[in-house]
Image: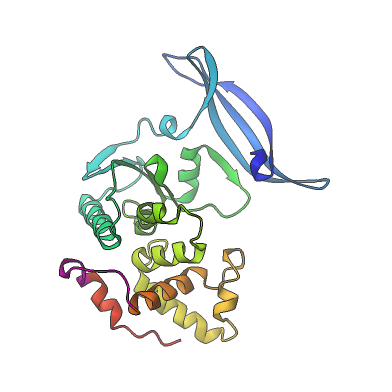
Amino acid sequence: SSDLGLSATVLDIQPAPTDTTVQFVVKTLLSREEGSRSEPVAAIRVYALQENGSWVFANALPRITAEWPRADVAQLSYVITPEGKFDRFDAEDFAAFADSVATRFDVPRLSCTLYYFANDAEELHRAMGVDWVASPPTVGYALWQDHLLLSGSAGFADANRHEVVHMLLAPLGLDGRTHPIVAEGVATWLGGAQGISFDALMRDYANYLRGNPSVTVDTALAGPRNDRGWYPTGAILALLAYEQGGFPRSEEHTSELQSRETISYAV
């Protein structure tokens, strides 16, 4: 955490109940040091256990969710909150969507991926071992190198399209030259945001802009910290780039985008 400018304070160490191994739950407070001030950022839980004669830390996620129901759909292995509703049809449609994105961008399809979903961001973070965060908790994560998708909303629990676009296209940005607005814009254009489709998001944003005429592309691109349209602006830029040439497509993959190309968003 020192690489991120954070300090760690161990709050508690307690034995973890287990029948087979000796483990401990370690609770830690992460803080950001600014001069003489210390600002709490997050409270987290990890496990400590012995491995090859040494003590190591282990993630909470597979332990907290060990008894959660499972379901396999195509290359996705779902780990489902006991309070959640799993829809196999939605999951199959989601897997087909992921394949279509991979085909369009000529990137590898999803390999075997663990997909954890919870009913809300708080439950998701508890499962991840995050007991508290200072900023509003994120409702989705794509950890592409670990082959993990995490979703924290009942509204799109088993079909987080935004995050799977991030996962599929992450290798394209490895050289560090891809601006964040491109990554978020393409993910929002293809996958929507927080369960809201691209088309619905554009209609909502058009209404917002009518009531806030001072908002410009420059103010929107100032960044998500003071968000006045970072995601929809990025999606619009992605759409405009696509309309100027886009990516090669076969007839098989045109149907979903054809309706979008004919829609006019009055702003």
> Would you say residue 251 sits in the magenta stretch?
yes
> Left or right: 152 with respect to 259?
right
Answer above or below: position of 131 versus 90. above
Is 231 drawn above or below residue 63 in the view shown? Answer: below
Q: Give the residue at x 67% y 30%.
A: 11
Foreground residue, 68 or 181? 181
Q: Position of residue 130 (x, y in %)?
A: 54, 40
Residue furthest top as drawn: 53
Query: Is 68 rendered above or below residue 101?
Result: above
Give the x, y percent position of residue 267.
Answer: 46, 86
Q: Which residues are magenta?
A: 245-255
**Image quarter of residue 247:** bottom left
Which residue is pictured at 35% across the width and 74% down the height? 242
Q: Residue 110 or 127: which is nearer the viewer?
A: 110
The structure residue drawn at horizontal position 21% and vertical position 45%, both measured from the top left corner, is: 74
| Prevailing SS of the magenta stretch | loop
